[in-house]
Image: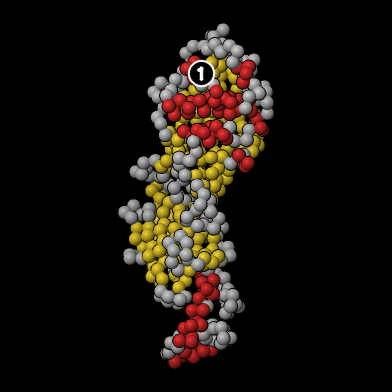
């Protein structure tokens, strides 16, 4: 409503008069047309923003500013970090949930000239407000919207964004800490009847996890070794190994809280001296990646005359030429697995000097053993497309931003005196960004190139 009859179908006085007469003020074709022309302003109003072309001075009550008390909603919840589920205000046939309450299909018809408001949040507490006793966020969720009506949406009560409805969209992750705290949408049908069609579920973080080398930064190091500075470390080769040799995949669906476990493309032989494990835990306040590469303690020494001095000064990619070292190291493995163990050896040869651990002049009649551990905490998770288009052209799906702690503890056993010697004990703190991309596109050859 406004006083300009060329813009608004009614003035305040005309609206009051229609109510007093008991008449419907939008029965005329002219008034209907003006209302439909201003439907985007109706959407802005329902998102808590004043109209742009009609009544720009309209009062915005708390209900429209907060997005509460009208329309439909989906709230992602959990109880004691068990069985996350989707709480919602909507009944069939508009809202249809699966048996576990973990997937929701929305199909909401909109008449011509109508709008459909929807609010999606994780835990339900007001954006930016700490409420005593409010539940922690649940598992990160997504809202997938199929092509259809025009849309206005806001993220965390930011400025409204318009989309024409021609593309499938994916808003994710919806999560109070690591992602989008509050998603508000108003679907518009100015010219014809439409159906708002969408799906709500939990995000899938499976695939290859890869460090972004340009964003990998050593912030602190404590090393018990003499040698070079670990600040030269530009990536985490063990995480690259995980991507080259396997992928993170969801744990069995019967678990109470979803998580991810690293699974090798090919099983390690039972007698392999190498154990490589990794897990991803999606908590209520962060996403955590933990890995461990363990090298079993050898039973006897190893004579490597004249070989190790040649390591110094070599580029990491040249380490692939060490194939004949594998039988001596007990890594006699066939096919792709054989190449994987060689990659592990290459990673170790790269890591140790960077941690301030100097091979050359130390190794002779000996073998090394120990473990390398890493733990990353990511407090930011982003969908790879900033415009939230579902159909991406890139293999990249998610971006993570956080910090990591790397702990290396390796020792030597010498045949000369049958004793153990500490080779390297280092603790390194890093800032890191990670990419999650589709499984199967990062290979051993890519690992070699990355080294």
Q: Residue at x 44, y 29 (%)?
A: 336
Q: Residue at x 67, y 22 (%)?
A: 226
In terms of depth relative to the viewer, which is nearer, 346 or 151? 346
Q: Residue at x 59, y 75 (%)?
A: 52
Q: Determine whether 60 is above or below 204 in the image.
A: below
Please give the residue where the numbered disc 1 appears in the rendered image: 324
Label 1: how many Cα within 10 Å (few below 14, some 14–19, many 20+): few
In terms of depth relative to the viewer, which is nearer, 57 or 297? 297
Residue 199 in view here = yes
Q: Quadrant of the image for the N terminus?
A: bottom right
User: So how many labels did they put on this image?
Assistant: 1
In terms of depth relative to the viewer, which is nearer, 435 or 323? 323
Viewed as shown, does residue 392 lie left or right of 251? right
Splitting the image into 4 quarters, where does residue 449 fall?
A: top right
Q: Determine whether 355 is above or below 214 in the image.
A: above
Q: Position of residue 118 (x, y in %)?
A: 45, 65
Q: Determine whether 401 is above or below 142 in the image.
A: above
Q: Quadrant of the image for the C terminus?
A: top right
Q: Position of residue 89 (x, y in %)?
A: 39, 64
Viewed as shown, does residue 372 lie left or right of 148? right
Q: Position of residue 121 (x, y in %)?
A: 48, 58
Callout 1: SS: loop
Q: Determine whether 69 is above or below 28 in the image.
A: above
Q: How is the image coloured?
A: secondary structure
Q: Position of residue 87 (x, y in %)?
A: 40, 58
Splitting the image into 4 quarters, where does residue 101 fall?
A: bottom left
Q: Residue at x 54, y 9 (%)?
A: 415
User: Which residue sits furthest top?
Assistant: 416
Splitting the image into 4 quarters, where does residue 114 fall?
A: bottom left
Residue 431 in view here = no
């Amino acid at each position: 409503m406004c006083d300009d009859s060329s813009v608004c179908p009614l003035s305040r006085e005309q609206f009051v008069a229609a109510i007093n007469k008991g008449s419907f003020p939008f029965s005329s074709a002219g008034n209907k047309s003006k209302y439909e022309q201003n439907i985007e302003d109706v959407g802005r109003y329902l998102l808590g923003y004043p109209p742009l072309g009609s009544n720009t001075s309209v009062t915005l009550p708390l209900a429209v500013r907060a997005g509460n008390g009208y329309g439909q909603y989906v709230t992602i919840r959990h109880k004691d970090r068990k069985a996350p589920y989707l709480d919602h205000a909507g009944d069939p046939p508009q809202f249809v949930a699966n048996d576990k309450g973990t997937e929701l299909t929305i199909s909401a018809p909109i008449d011509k000239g109508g709008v459909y408001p929807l609010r999606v949040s994780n835990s339900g507490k007001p954006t930016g407000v700490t409420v005593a006793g409010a539940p922690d966020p649940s598992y990160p969720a997504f809202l997938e919207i199929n092509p259809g009506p025009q849309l206005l949406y806001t993220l965390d009560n930011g400025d409204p964004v318009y989309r024409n409805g021609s593309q499938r969209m994916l808003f994710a992750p919806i999560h109070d800490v690591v992602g989008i705290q509050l998603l508000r949408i108003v679907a518009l049908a100015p010219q014809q009847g439409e159906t708002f069609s969408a799906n709500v579920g939990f995000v899938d973080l499976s695939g290859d996890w890869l460090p972004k080398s340009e964003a990998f930064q050593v912030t602190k190091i404590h090393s018990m070794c003499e040698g070079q500075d670990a600040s030269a470390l530009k990536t985490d080769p063990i995480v690259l190994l995980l991507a080259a040799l396997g992928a993170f995949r969801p744990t069995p669906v019967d678990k109470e809280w979803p998580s991810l476990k690293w699974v090798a493309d090919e099983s390690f032989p039972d007698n392999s001296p190498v154990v490589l494990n990794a897990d991803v835990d999606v908590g209520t306040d962060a996403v955590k990646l933990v890995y461990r590469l363990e090298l079993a303690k050898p039973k006897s020494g190893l004579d490597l005359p004249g070989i190790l001095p040649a390591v110094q000064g070599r580029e990491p990619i040249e380490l692939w030429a060490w194939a004949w070292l594998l039988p001596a190291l007990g890594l006699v493995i066939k096919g792709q697995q054989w190449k994987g163990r060689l990659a592990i050896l290459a990673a170790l040869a790269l890591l140790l000097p960077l941690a301030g651990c100097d091979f050359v002049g130390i190794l002779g009649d000996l073998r090394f053993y120990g473990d390398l551990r890493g733990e990353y905490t990511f407090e930011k998770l982003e969908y790879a497309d900033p415009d939230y288009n579902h159909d991406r052209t890139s293999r990249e799906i998610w971006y993570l931003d956080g910090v990591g702690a790397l702990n290396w503890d390796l020792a030597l056993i010498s045949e000369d005196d049958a004793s153990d010697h500490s080779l390297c004990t280092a603790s390194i703190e890093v800032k890191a960004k990670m990419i999650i991309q589709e499984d199967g596109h990062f290979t051993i050859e890519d690992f070699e190139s990355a080294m």
